Image (cartoon, rainbow, N blue to C red):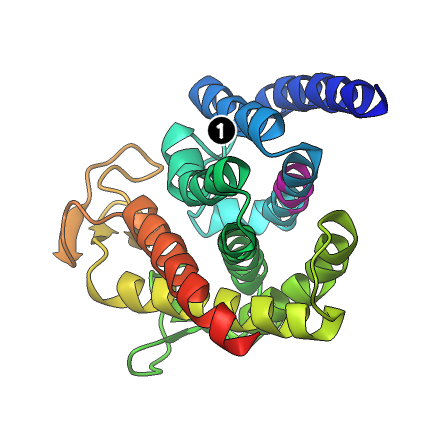
């Protein structure tokens, strides 16, 4: 009976937070619908713990995005008065998390719990790293050759962003440890999540620097990840594959490293 009450409270909380996210322009309507589908399905199939972690990750990453938003608008990374994330962003980052959570709910196998947690922490770490890293006073460096590049360029990494990503997972691991019971020491859990989330970030940056489409806006004199810049001008493709955008890179990075973790974690444990 208590579980039913908690689930109902969590369901209502999720809907309320979704409305707030839409009103505050954290998510488009399409993003809200997809996010609710993922979250409520996980609540029904796997239980409240998985949705609680999702909500915490969503809340913290949105705070990170809002941090220094005026600087990000000035750099052309975010369009003023527009929605921050749409359904494509939710699917790219959330679908791997949803898949592994769903598989755990169906098969009740601990290995899928780790797949879920790794996918979640890659998303969490990558978002924190990106959102904090762009605020660094130092120019970021391209991961494939360590040359200094403009802030916000795909494949660019910074010391501030990297450290922020690692620390965020270390702190998030504390929450995970108390929310989801696992037969593993806390320190080992934290190190595993830091290892694979960092691997996900590295792969994301590598793909961003090599195959992700990079455009250039002649009007604003800025690089862009999208063909249509925030000024609504059409950009010129200067490198990468046209159909490999940031969403594709995010999905590949999260899904592939999560799959790899499910193969390697049993060997570690």
Q: Residues within 10 Å of mark 1 (few under 14, many from 20)?
A: some
Q: Position of residue 99 (x, y in %)?
A: 43, 40
Judged left or right of residue 68, residue 231 is left
Q: Regarding mark 1 in the picture, which secondary structure is present there? A: loop
Which secondary structure type mostly characterizes the magenta part of the structure?
Answer: helix
The residue where tag 1 is placed is 83
Q: Position of residue 78 (x, y in %)?
A: 46, 42
Residue 137 visible somewhere in the drawing: no
Q: Nearer the viewer, residue 221 or 245?
A: 245
Residue at 67% over, 46% down = 60
Residue at 43% over, 30% down = 86
Residue range in magenta is 54-60
Judged left or right of residue 211, residue 187 is right
Residue at 63% over, 40% down = 50
Q: Nearer the viewer, residue 130 or 116?
A: 116
Q: Position of residue 246 (x, y in %)?
A: 32, 49
Judged left or right of residue 30, residue 10 is right
Position of residue 49 relative to residue 123, above or below, is above
Query: Which part of the image, by quadrant, shows the C terminus?
Result: bottom right
Q: Is residue 63 magenta?
A: no
Q: Position of residue 2 (x, y in %)?
A: 85, 23
Query: Which part of the image, by quadrant, shows the N terminus?
Result: top right
Residue 222 visible somewhere in the drawing: yes
């Amino acid at each position: 009976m208590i579980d039913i009450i908690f689930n109902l409270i969590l369901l209502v909380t999720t809907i309320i937070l979704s409305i707030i996210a839409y009103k505050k322009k954290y998510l488009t309507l399409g993003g809200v619908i997809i996010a609710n589908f993922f979250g409520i399905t996980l609540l029904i199939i796997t239980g409240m713990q998985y949705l609680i972690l999702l909500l915490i990750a969503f809340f913290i990453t949105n705070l990170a995005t809002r941090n220094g938003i005026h600087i990000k608008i000035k750099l052309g990374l975010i369009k003023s008065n527009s929605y921050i994330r749409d359904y494509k962003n939710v699917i790219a980052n959330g679908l791997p998390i949803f898949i592994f959570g769903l598989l755990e709910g169906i098969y009740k196998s601990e290995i899928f719990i780790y797949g879920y947690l790794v996918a979640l922490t890659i998303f969490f770490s990558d978002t924190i790293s990106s959102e904090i890293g762009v605020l660094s006073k130092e120019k970021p460096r391209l991961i494939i050759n360590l040359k200094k590049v403009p802030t916000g360029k795909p494949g660019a990494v910074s010391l501030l962003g990297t450290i922020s990503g690692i620390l965020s997972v270390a702190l998030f691991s504390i929450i995970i440890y108390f929310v989801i019971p696992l037969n593993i020491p806390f320190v080992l859990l934290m190190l595993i999540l830091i290892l694979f989330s960092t691997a996900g970030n590295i792969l994301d940056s590598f793909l961003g620097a090599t195959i992700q489409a990079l455009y250039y806006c002649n009007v604003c004199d800025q690089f862009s990840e999208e063909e249509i810049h925030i000024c609504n001008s059409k950009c010129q493709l200067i490198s990468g594959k046209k159909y490999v955008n940031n969403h594709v890179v995010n999905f590949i990075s999260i899904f592939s490293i999560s799959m790899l973790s499910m193969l390697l974690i049993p060997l570690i444990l």
